[in-house]
Image (cartoon, grey):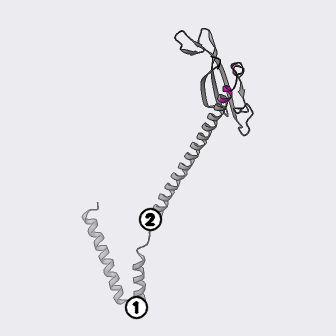
Amino acid sequence: MPNTADSTAIYLALRLSSELVSHLEEIALPTQIMHIRQLRACRGGFSYLDVMVAVMIIGVAVTALVQAMASTTKVNVAAREASVAVNLVRNIHERAMSLSLSQVDALNGRTFTTPIGSDGAALTGYDGWSQTVQVGRVVVDATHDIKANATGTPSTRLRRVNVQAVHKGAVIYNESWLLASTGF
């Protein structure tokens, strides 16, 4: 808050400039009077400081907007990768459901560098993607608890299937499930 001396000085300067303009109007020629009045009217425009502050505010806003768009693009790419990975794992799941247990056992340790669909056919347009399948036997103990990779007599009717969808060397999605033969 300005002190009283500053306020008084500003008031006197404004009053003197107003009196000076009034005095000039009295002694000036009519064309000069018009020029002085036009100068008074022009004083209401923007200063360079006003323009610079506005440009800085707009610059910060545009920068924030561009960063938000870049962040959204990254999230969209990650979401697309996750969606593709889930579908590739589900393809193996559907495929395993249509096979016998001995055929599922044959998938153990396989990596499909060209991903396959639920019908077993190679899928195109999935460069950099692969599906890795692990099949293990499970043990059902006396309390009927199911234990994967446990010691004991493995069930002949149950398998644990684990599938990973890998994109450019990184595991994007991993899913495991139990598969039972239908001959109970």
Of the residues shown, which amino acid type is indicated by label 2? Asp
Looking at the image, is 55 positioned above or below residue 121? below
Percent position (x, y) of residue 9?
A: 28, 69
* Residue beneath the point at 52% across and 55% down: 62
Mark closer to the observer (2, 1):
2
* Residue beneath the point at 32% across and 79% down: 18
Residue assigned mark 1 = 30
Is label 1 in a helix, a strand or a loop?
helix
Percent position (x, y) of residue 81?
A: 62, 38
Quarter in which the C terminus is drawn: top right
Of the residues shown, which amino acid type is indicated by label 1? Pro
Q: Is residue 95 magenta?
A: yes
Q: Whole-Å distance between the Cαs marked 2 and 1?
A: 34 Å
Of 151 and 65, which appears nearest the observer?
151
Q: Is residue 152 magenta?
A: no
Say which mark, if any, is on residue 50.
Answer: 2
> Disc 2 or 1, which lies upstream in sequence?
1
Q: In the rendered structure, which segment of residues is drawn in magenta? A: 94-102
Residue 95 located left or right of residue 142: right
Mark 1 packing: few (<14 Cα in 10 Å), some, or many (20+)? few
